[in-house]
Image (cartoon, rainbow, N blue to C red):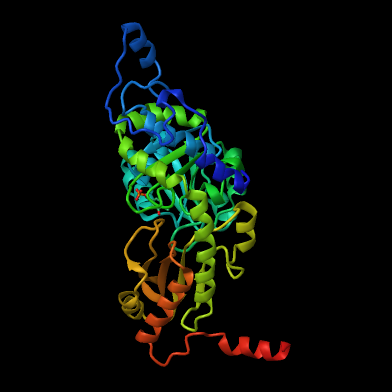
């Protein structure tokens, strides 16, 4: 794992580059094609469209700059950027599986990923078993002779459940399967799955990596062995490229990724700790809290935490929707990873019956004390007379004893 300090230099520093006339900001090469003086040069370049600049569906200098930075941050040999996280994920999966293959996937994975694996790929004869990914036994039990891929997302982005990454990659190695891990939540600043034996890492760049809620993008990072076929086939044939304009914006966001992640980590924990003290909360799903059942595993395989988490409550979901309507700083909306705090409200079901409300909070870069006050005031409005701070009295009692 890179030392955290080193990541700041990695995103901020480049050597002098004569090709760009020493430009400090990487120019946006807004061009579809590259031309050649001689036919011989053209033919030479065309032999490897992923390394040479020939056509912007293959390789474009602005996009390539971003890819090289992301590969370095993730400690991979090569990265390829895509039009969206889903373009990256579906291409990565298709680069590994073929007709008759079997996939094992954590049942908490991102919804469209589960839809792609569980429904869409069925028409090509690929079968997927979804398992409770938190226990290695479930992965082992699901193995079949034709298992080709273990698909991980750790932590998951609704219940924040972890998978034991090293144990899963060891299992994959024993059975001759590949692994893909969606690292969107932790970012390369907090988790480096390739160093733990994962074959391909995927990200929704839309989230923390771009970080400013103004881009949609994705990336796959890995070894040349797995990246070369993916780039020459799924990337080139589906054509889900990231444009040079988007790559320029994402690169601007990347300059502050390690800085932003430090703040997100601290603010996310502060608000999560506040939430865990509220009487209306039955459980907080944040791997950085000691109350998380996989807190020890989180410390083994991650070097930090980000700022998207959820909490559960016996209070009806309508009450939290009313809370969301009242909030000033938290905006109502999907996605996460930008500068602005967000809230969504759902329900947990068991046997088709709602059993608890599930509220997901994304903590942006605002002052966390403003966010806490916002939550307090909105709760007081929707539940007047409720003694929101659940452990208030016990804490006071402790103070008296100590004092
Ligand atoms: C948003 C998201 C994706 C999909 O990314 P898009 O850029 O929206 O296609 C994949 N995985 C996770 C965990 C996400 O949150």
| Quarter the C terminus occupies | bottom right
Residue plotted at (33% across, 29% down): 236
| Quarter the N terminus occupies | top right
Percent coordinates x, y for residue 179 in the rendering: 51, 41
Determine whether 147 is above or below 339 in the image: above
Q: Residue furthest right?
A: 402
Residue plotted at (36% across, 58% down): 335
Residue plotted at (62% across, 68% down): 290
Percent coordinates x, y for residue 225 in the rendering: 51, 28
Determine whether 94 is above or below 340 in the image: above
Instruction: Tell how many labels.
Output: 0
The residue nearer to you, when weighing 76 against 10, is 10
Percent coordinates x, y for residue 130 in the rendering: 45, 53
Determine whether 128 is above or below 41 in the image: below
Residue 143: tell me if it is visible: yes
Percent coordinates x, y for residue 212 in the rendering: 37, 53
Horizontal side of 387 relative to 119 (left or right) equals right
Residue plotted at (50% across, 41% down): 11
Residue 89: tell me if it is visible: no
């Amino acid at each position: 794992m890179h030392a955290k300090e080193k990541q700041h230099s990695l995103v901020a520093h480049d050597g002098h580059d004569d090709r760009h006339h020493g430009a400090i900001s990487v120019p946006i090469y807004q061009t579809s094609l590259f031309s050649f003086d001689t036919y011989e040069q053209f033919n030479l370049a065309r032999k490897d469209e992923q390394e040479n600049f020939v056509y912007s569906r293959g390789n474009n200098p602005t996009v390539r700059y971003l890819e090289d930075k992301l590969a370095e941050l993730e400690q991979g040999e090569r990265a390829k950027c895509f039009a969206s996280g889903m373009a990256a994920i579906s291409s990565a999966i298709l680069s590994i599986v073929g007709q008759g293959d079997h996939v094992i996937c954590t049942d908490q994975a991102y919804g469209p990923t589960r839809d792609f694996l569980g429904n869409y790929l069925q028409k090509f004869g690929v079968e997927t078993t979804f398992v409770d990914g938190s226990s290695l036994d479930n992965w082992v039990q699901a193995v079949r002779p034709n298992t080709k891929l273990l698909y991980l997302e750790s932590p998951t982005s609704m219940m924040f459940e972890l998978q034991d990454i090293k144990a899963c990659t060891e299992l994959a190695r024993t059975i001759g399967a590949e692994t893909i891990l969606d690292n969107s939540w932790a970012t390369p600043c907090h988790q480096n799955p390739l160093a733990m034996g994962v074959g391909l890492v995927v990200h929704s760049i839309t989230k923390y990596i771009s970080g400013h809620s103004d881009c949609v993008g994705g990336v796959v990072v890995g070894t040349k062995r797995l990246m070369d076929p993916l780039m020459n086939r799924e990337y080139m044939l589906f054509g889900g490229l990231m444009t040079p304009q988007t790559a320029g914006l994402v690169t601007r966001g990347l300059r502050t990724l390690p800085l932003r992640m430090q703040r997100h980590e601290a603010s996310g924990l502060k608000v999560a700790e506040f939430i865990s003290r509220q009487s209306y909360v039955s459980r907080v799903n944040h791997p950085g809290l000691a109350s998380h059942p996989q807190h020890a595993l989180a410390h083994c395989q991650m070097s930090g935490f980000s700022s998207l988490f959820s909490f559960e409550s016996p209070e009806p979901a309508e009450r939290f929707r009313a809370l969301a309507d009242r909030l000033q700083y938290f905006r109502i909306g999907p996605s996460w990873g930008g500068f602005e705090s967000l809230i969504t409200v759902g329900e947990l079901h068991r046997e088709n019956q709602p059993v608890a409300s599930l509220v997901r909070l994304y903590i942006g870069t605002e002052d966390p004390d403003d966010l806490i006050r916002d939550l307090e005031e909105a709760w007081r409005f929707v539940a007047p007379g409720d003694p929101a701070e659940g452990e208030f009295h016990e804490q006071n009692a402790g103070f008296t004893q100590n004092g």
